[in-house]
Image (tube, grey):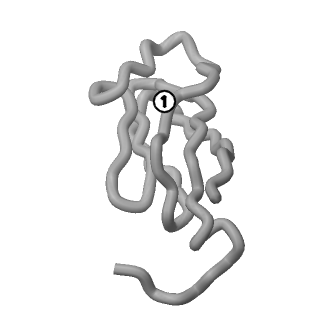
Amino acid sequence: YARRDVISCSSFDRRYSVCQLPRGAREVRITKRFSNAGCRRGKDWGVRRGGIWVDNGCRASFSYILHSQYAYGDKRRRY
């Protein structure tokens, strides 16, 4: 089982910023842009271990899928 959730992330003053994603988040995509910036994946936003990065004034909401072993607070380590 997996559930889709949403997080907002913003680059204020065109500066680089990182927003934390929950452990197990996958399939991140932009759902709504709040800025006039391009918000192009790989240039203005992207995903790195544990978070979404934004830059160049990109402000948006992002959806992601959280898989079942993490969706209910299972704290067992998974490698």
Q: Depth check: 17 or 50 in front? A: 50
Q: Give the residue at the far front of this rendering.
A: 1
Query: What residue is rendered at 50% in x and 32% in y?
Result: 29
Residue positioned 67% across, 51% down in the render: 3
Identify the residue position indicated by label 1 in the image. 13
In this view, which residue lies farthest toward the left? Answer: 42
Residue 32 appears left or right of 56: right
Q: Is residue 15 above or below residue 7?
A: above
Q: Is residue 75 left or right of residue 45?
A: right
Q: How many marks?
A: 1
> What amino acid is found at the position of numbered circle 1 in the picture?
Asp
Foreground of the two, 29 or 36: 29
Pointer 1 local density, CA inside 10 Å: few below 14, some 14–19, many at least 20: few
Quarter of the image for residue 17 reads top left
Along the line of sight, the residue nearer the viewer: 43 or 2: 2
* Spot occupied by residue 19 in the image (x, y as percentages of width and height): 51, 51
In this rendered view, identify the residue nearer to me: 25 or 53. 25
Residue at figure coordinates x 41%, y 81% from the top left: 78
65 relative to 18 in the view: left or right: right
Going 62% across and 81% down the picture, which residue do you hit?
Answer: 74
The location of residue 72, given as percent across then percent down, is 71, 73
Figure check: 79 above or below 37: below
The image shows residue 19, relative to residue 13, as above or below, that is below
Which quadrant would the C terminus be assigned to in this image? bottom left
**27 vs 66: above or below:** above
Placement of the N terminus among the 4 image quadrants: bottom right
| SS state under label 1 | helix
